[in-house]
Image: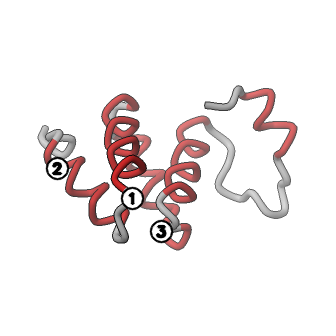
Amino acid sequence: MQSIKDILKKFNPLEDRYVSREFQVFGVHLAKKLADERRKSLYIKLSKTIPRPVLEEALRYVIDSNARKKVALFMWKLKELKAFDK
C-alpha cells in the first residue's frame, strides 16, 4: 500500500476527483485491481463501510484466482466472509 506522501505526489486535481480521503484512495485502488473503474463509487463506499482486512482478503483471493469475472468473484468472497452482515 502506498503512503499518503506518495499519493499526494501523484495527485492531479483535474483528473483525480475521487481522492480526498484515504478510504477513497483504497476504493479507487480496488476498482483498478478489479478492472472495473466504471463503478468507482461502489468500491469507495465498500472501503468506507467494510473493514480493510476483509476487503484485502477478498482482493487477494480474486487476484490469486486468475478469474475472468473478477468483480463477481470479489462480491461472492465478501459475502462468504460475511462482510455484509450487521
The residue depicted at 34 percent of the width and 53 percent of the height is 65
Identity, as a three-letter code, of the amino acid under mark 2: Lys
Picture quarter with the C terminus: top left
Q: Nearer the viewer, residue 74 or 38?
A: 74
Identity, as a three-letter code, of the amino acid under mark 1: Asn
Left of 51 or right of it: where is 10?
right
Q: Residues within 10 Å of mark 2 (few under 14, many from 20)?
A: few
The residue depicted at 58 percent of the width and 53 percent of the height is 28
Q: Is residue 78 above or below residue 42?
A: above
State the CA–CA distance, disc 2 to disc 1. Answer: 19 Å
Left of 83 or right of it: where is 57?
right
Mark 3 lies on residue: 39
Mark 1 lies on residue: 66
Disc 2 is placed on an element classified as: helix
Disc 1 is placed on an element classified as: loop
Disc 3 is placed on an element classified as: helix
Nearer-N-terminus badge (1/3): 3
